[in-house]
Amino acid sequence: MTMTTKLTAVAMSGGVDSSVAAALLSREGRPLVGFSMQLVDKLAGETERYGRCCSPDDFRDARAIADRLGFPHYVLDMEDDFRRQVLEPFAADYAAGRTPSPCLRCNTFVKFDALWERAAAVGALSVATGHYAILERDARSGRTRLRAGADPGKDQSYFLFDLSDEQRARTEFPLGRMTKDEVRALARTFALATAEKPESMDLCFVSEGDSYRDVLARSGLGPAATPGEIVDAEGRVLATHEGIERFTVGQRRGLGLATGEKLYVIGLDPARARVVVGDEADLYRESCTVERVRWIPFERPGGPQRVTVRIRSTHAGASAVVTDRGDGTAVVSFDEAQRAVTPGQAAVFYDGDLVLGGGWIAG
């Protein structure tokens, strides 16, 4: 086995994926240092209540893996970074009538930016994580491409489209070409204590039984509720509400309407504090504008791109043409109208398993 002097930082959540990523790199003889990120301390000071990440048990599990594999492990206090880069924009998006994607911002601005700075300070040349996605260097362009992970049920490329080329170039995803079952099997082979640990789902900073509204309120970030009207597409007032941050496009339950019809939120008007409702057919859109567009294999495409676009993380993808406007925005024209195209969510463009880029759905 050839040893290398290249120090790699491993982001360790205390789960099975990051544990196996570390074990694979350790098996290669790589010098490693493990970092766990303290993103949310006890929920507003309440003892024994944590989000779905950052608990003392998670940190103990991560340290146990590092000890077993023989490399140092540190817990980093990154609460200020997380609040500034994730929680505050999260609250602002809801107050503005958008539905945010906090996991995307956490990747772009915390895991692969703020964490990278701390890793570089100790001499690490790259950061490895347990994400299910594939990075590969394009020798012709010199850029680092992003592809979907081999396991379609675990692929996380959607959440990684907004990384810059510099961020992608200094990142490693050891699990990208593996399935979850293979990762679990490797964890057992390596005799890792996290081999059977259940996965953390949903928003990592929200504890079991809580909602994101509870977390924002306890953090002093809950938007000041502005009462307003629930109206139909013609502007007729149907009811009142306590704040548009309680609603998202496509929502049906919790509208407080007794019209006898199946009504859905089809739009939000923050300027007038209005929630607009309609029937399911009103949810469909033939096109949308995306902003803050990032292209991955190239700086800008040479013309309209035929793509498969995912308009939320759970979306199967739809055939479309994306036309870059040259001003940081693009227009997505769907072959077939799509349901609940939601402002604030990401639209990510694919050519097969190759991620071409993406942007944020505009209101």
Image (cartoon, rainbow, N blue to C red):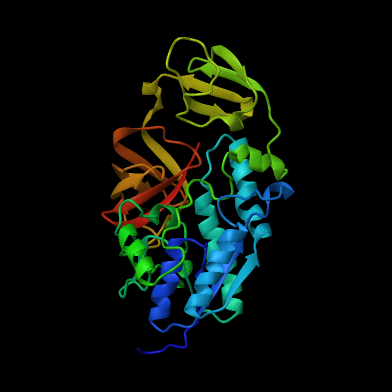
Residue 333 in view in this figure: yes
Question: How many discs appear?
Answer: 0
Up/down of 96 relative to 358, above or below: above
| Residue at 43% across, 12% down | 261
Q: Nearer the viewer, residue 256 or 280?
A: 256
Residue 137 lies, with reference to residue 283, above or below; the image says below
Residue under the image location 53 percent in, 21 percent down: 255
The x and y percentages for residue 196 are 42, 58
Inspect this view and state whether residue 146 appears.
no
Residue 49 x %, y %: 65, 48
Q: Quadrant of residue 284?
A: top left
Residue shown at the point (48%, 67%) measured from the top left: 167
**Residue 225: quadrant of the picture:** top right
**Residue drawn where x is 41% and y is 76% of the image:** 25
Q: Position of residue 38 (x, y in %)?
A: 63, 61
Where is residue 28 drawn, in percent x and y? 38, 81
Depth check: give the residue in front, 326 or 288. 288
Taking the image as shown, residue 47 lies to the left or right of residue 181, namely right
Q: Is residue 339 above or below residue 305?
A: above
Q: Choose between 248 and 293: the one closer to the eye.
A: 248
Along the horizontal axis of the image, is 327 left or right of 302?
A: right
Quarter placement of the N terminus: bottom left
Q: Is the residue 122 above or below the residue 77 in the image?
A: below
